[in-house]
Amino acid sequence: MTAPTLRDVAQLAGVHPATASRALNPQTRPLVNADTARKVLRAAESIGYQPNPIARSLKTARSSTVGLVIPDLTNPLFPPIVRGIEDVLTPAGYNAWIVNTDNDPGREEAQVESLRSRQVEGLIVATARREHPLLTRLHQQGVRMVLVNRRVDGLELPSVAADDDAGIALAVAHLIALGHTRIAHLAGPQQTSTGVSRARAFRHALIDNGLPDDPALIVECRYWSETEGAQALRKLLDSGAEFTAIVAGNDLIALGCYDVFAERGLTCPDDMSVIGFNEMPFLDKMRPPLTTVAIPHYEIGGEAARLLLDTLDDPERHPRSVLLAPSLVVRASTGPPK
């Protein structure tokens, strides 16, 4: 049994094949009379016609696909971002190819080349590095890209991220309101834009509130992980530095602190308060539930998709960056100091 063709759809709907083709393509459907488009869609559905995206891309030089480059799919930050991206792309007639790079430059380059071989029209990249030769090269080659939740030094690309400065300021202000004056920061990796911006925002927040900017209370984590968070807190405690609260670079680093509290016989928040950043799932199930800065993951994904569609529609558009406001979710991991 042969598969139904575009000509079969056109004949059943009583229109020219070119009209049927336009009606079946979400990008060109507005060019067709609404009643005619509905007639074509009903005809296609009634005979089980499926458009051939490969044939269409060969004819139009457009694949209606976008590459989505994720550094770590196991990080709970990314699923809602991906959902936001897909929910904007799908009504516009686009599909996303998702690749995971494991933060490995060689794997990332291979995955991006694989996406390009599939003729994706653009890339949404959640890179983790501030310096990124591959993205610089792709930009020079005219590849349309949007950065999500990250920035790359010296590269003018559209980007969407949460306002790290505002989020860290909320965390520090909350702790100060509780009475804390010695606040430590377990910073994210300083080769990432997020790690740098949150550490800088932390120092500014202390100064803005009249507290000393003490370098001894800032420890860098090499990775965004629980293991690194635990190791950084051990280092801080072993140094003899005095502090009663911690602002962690992200939720995973904050959760690493919980292991150390148990090791050292510390009670949270009586002995030590801690705040995370990102609002990962299930933080309310921790003991104690983790206070954190929530960022709008789904909205970040949706805005990134809209920026890329804008760029595809108008390649000469000047790159613009979007910052979305965070909020503070107060739970039981913060309280007044002893």
Image (cartoon, helix red, strand yellow):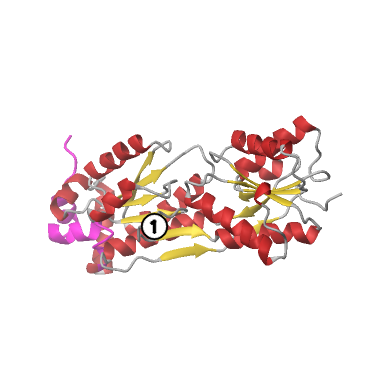
Is residue 206 a member of the stretch shown in magenta? no
- Does residue 309 sit above or below 79 in this rendering? below
* Residue 136 % position (x, y): 30, 52
Residue at coordinates 23% horizontally, 56% vertically from top-left?
142
Query: Does residue 134 sit above or below 110 in this rendering?
Result: below
User: Left or right: where does residue 141 sit relative to residue 185?
Assistant: left
> Which residue appears farthest toward the top when viewing the image?
263
Front-most of 267 and 8?
A: 267
Q: How many marks?
A: 1
- Quadrant in the picture for residue 148: bottom left
Q: Which residues are magenta?
A: 1-30
Query: What residue is pinned by disc 1?
Result: 305
Could you tell me the amino acid type at mark 1?
Answer: Ala
Q: Is residue 9 left or right of residue 66?
A: left
Q: Nearer the viewer, residue 23 or 45?
A: 23
Kindly identify the residue that appears in the image at 72 percent across and 34 percent down: 260
Q: Residue at x 28, y 54 (%)?
A: 139
- Crowding at dot 1, Cα within 10 Å, few <14 / some 14-19 / many 20+, comes out as many
Horizontal and vertical percent position of residue 113: 26, 41
Depicted 284 relative to depicted 318: above or below: above
Does residue 86 show up? yes
Query: Which image quadrant for residue 22?
Result: bottom left
